[in-house]
Amino acid sequence: MIKKKFFRLLRKTIAGNFDFKEHIGELRNMCKQSYNDFLQKDIDPQNRKVQGLEKVFLNFFPITHQKSKMFIEYINYTISDPRLTEIDCTIRGVNYGGSLRVNLKVTNLQTNEVQNVESCIGELPLLTNSLCRTNAKMSRCNFFHGE
């Protein structure tokens, strides 16, 4: 019982004396760098490291579909630039993001026909300099701006 009270008091003391607003910029930069390392959006597909989204695709492919006798191999992915600006996304209440497109090599195992296919998987949110426009709600911006 004494230990619980001590740790609660210690936690309140540490949290009370720590000024989080000083470190918002560092936190923001750390989040952006981590997300950019995960996406590797601005890196040429042939030069990407085997980490993040690239590693996810490499772990799931190749896929062999026994019933339809298809073999699907992963080639690379691209993330398109957003169709709307950050301000337009905020006004419309939508996420700021780009399309995730995956290039695949599909082989028909019965006919040995090979076809390259580009498939749109979906939209990926992209981080902005202010980070708040990805939420599309201005009320959440105050935390990131330190207000």
Image (cartoon, rainbow, N blue to C red):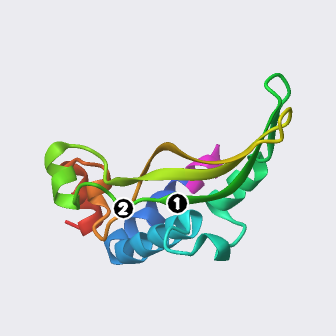
Furthest residue in direction top, as rendered: 67
Secondary structure beneath label 2? loop
Picture coordinates of residue 7, whole percent (x, y): 58, 55
User: Mark 1 Cα within 10 Å, few/some/many (few <14, many 20+)?
Assistant: many
Q: Quadrant of residue 17?
A: bottom left
120 shown above or below 9: above
Q: Horizontal placement of 126 versus 143: left or right?
A: right
Q: Quadrant where the N terminus lies?
A: top right
Judging by the rendered image, the residue that carries numbered circle 1 is: 78
Q: How many angstroms separate mark 1 from mark 2 (CA)? A: 10 Å
Q: Amino acid at mark 2?
A: Asp
Secondary structure beneath label 1? strand
Residue beneath the point at 86% across and 27% down = 66
Q: Horizontal placement of 132 versus 26: left or right?
A: left
Looking at the picture, tell me which residue is in the foreground, 78 or 8. 78
46 shown above or below 97: below
**Magenta stretch contains residue 3:** yes
Judging by the rendered image, the residue that carries numbered circle 2 is: 81
Q: Which residues are magenta?
A: 1-7
Looking at the picture, tell me which residue is in the foreground, 102 or 22. 102
Residue 18: tell me if it is visible.
no
Q: Amino acid at mark 1?
A: Thr
Furthest residue in direction left, as rendered: 91
Picture coordinates of residue 11, whole percent (x, y): 51, 59
Residue beneath the point at 49% across and 51% down = 100
Residue beneath the point at 36% across and 76% down = 25
Q: Main secondary structure of the magenta part?
A: helix
